[in-house]
Amino acid sequence: MAIRIMHVVNNLGKGGLENGLVNLIERMDADRFEHVVCTVRGLGPNAERLHKDRVQVLPLGESNSHSRFQTPALLRAVRRFEPDVVHSRNWGAIEAVVAGRMSRGCAVVHSEHGLEAAAGANEPKRRVYLRRMAFALADQVLSVSFQLRDLHARRTGFPARKIAVIHNGVDRKRFFPDSATRQRVREELGMGDAQFCIGCVANLLPVKDHVTLLESLTGLSEGGRDWRLLLIGEGPERARLEALVDKRPDFKPRVSFLGSSNRVPELLRAMDVFVLPSVAEGICNSLLEAMASGLAVVATRVGGNPEVVADGESGLLFKVADVRGLSNHLLRLQAQPGVRDQLGQRAVKRVGDQFSIESMVQAYERLYSGVRSETAVPVLSVG
């Protein structure tokens, strides 16, 4: 009999967590696993990617948006669908741990996928206490990086050895180098083959710190370099970022806000360098996708980024908000295409060897089978 899993998330927006959940469901063995996705506060564009004939979607937010606490509604959903495993993700869905435990008829998994602010920022004591309680109630706690595991263990006092780590994986059938696509998309965007193209795929949120990326481009601009920046993503920071660009006449024709896009694989192939300037991360799917696409990547030394990028080997790292450090990396990569190519080639190999989506799916299948059969689940490490 197939194992039924109820995945609980805050919503199905265009974030890495939501994208990763859909990727996971699409690739798990349909003969062994059934899926119900429960969203606590509304749906989102990733809901359209789920095949309705195979996956049931229950948006609690549409009928319970007036309620701040969702445990009763979640408990009703668990009793209605009778899952074998309830898997909640991040703080927005953490009440599902309580609902799953109250139902007494299923195993409970909770996973942490990233942070809403810098790692050094203080969390409210109430949230720390409730997260610690949820960790203790769950049959298995997961994290997507060792850094995030250790951070939550330090904050909550929950033993790090009891938190499993499963790294995100990248779909190399969608993300791979392709010179023909590069040329076609560049022509479409009005770029010549020699123009130095920098890109970033990330929601326009404060935690992603696009401001540092924009400020780092001054060095390229003042040096008379031929460059272009593609920003892919939407969010509340867009107006602020556009205002910063508007103040720089030399930036306006070079910076393109492309919004949310379903052409990310093609757009990545048009770039020379991918920059991730976040102040906090779990394991960033966009970073993995850029590496699989053969790009030289430059990322902040935070969260799981150093677990993905071997500094100087498969990419370059810099300190959070270090405008000069990022600018120096970009100047070097613009001037040395051979270095870009070498970093990109090593990046492709690294994600293939250590961050494949196949390995990620296998790890989750083992996890769900283990907690369902009430066997001891070891701390996992993929990558």
Image: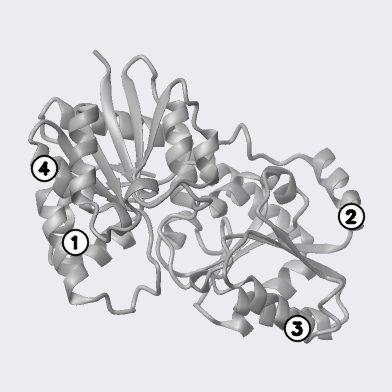
Tell me whether the residue at label 1 lies in contact with that at label 3, contact meaning CB atoms closer than 8 angstroms. Answer: no
259 left or right of 103 in image:
right
Vertical placement of residue 50 versus 19, above or below: above
Q: Residue visible at 51% across and 58% down?
A: 309
Q: Let me know if residue 16 appears in the view.
A: yes
Spatial CA span between label 4 and label 2: 57 Å
Apparent side of residue 279 relative to residue 272 in the rendered image (left or right): left
Label 1 vs 3, first from the N-terminus: 1
For the residue carrying disc 3, how many other residues have a C-alpha within 10 Å: few (<14), some (14-19), or many (20+)? Answer: some
Alpha carbon separation for disc pair 2 and 3: 21 Å
Tag 4 and tag 2, C-beta contact below 8 Å: no
Please report the residue visible at 29 percent of the width from the left and 34 percent of the height from the top. 6
Rendered location of residue 327, percent (x, y): 67, 79
Q: Which residue is mark 3?
A: 219
In the picture shown, does residue 27 fall above or below 268?
above
Secondary structure at numbered mark 4: helix
Residue that badge 4 annotates: 101
Q: Which residue, given by chain and number where applicable, does mark 1 sit on?
A: 131
Q: Residue at x 57, y 63 (%)?
A: 312
Q: Dot 2: what SS?
A: loop
Q: Earlier in the sequence, mark 4 or mark 2?
A: 4
**Residue kind at label 3, given as amino acid type:** Gly
User: Crowdedness of circle 2 by 10 Å Cα count: few (<14), some, many (20+)?
Assistant: few
Q: Nearer the viewer, mark 1 or mark 2?
A: 1
Residue plotted at (46% across, 20% down):
53
From the image, tell me which residue sits under label 2: 193
**Where residue 249 appears, x then y in whole percent?**
85, 83
Above or below: residue 102 compared with residue 338: above
Among numbered discs 4 and 3, the one appearing first in the sequence:
4
Mark 4 or mark 3, whichever is nearer to me: 4
**Quarter the N terminus occupies:** top left
Which mark is in front, 1 or 4? 4
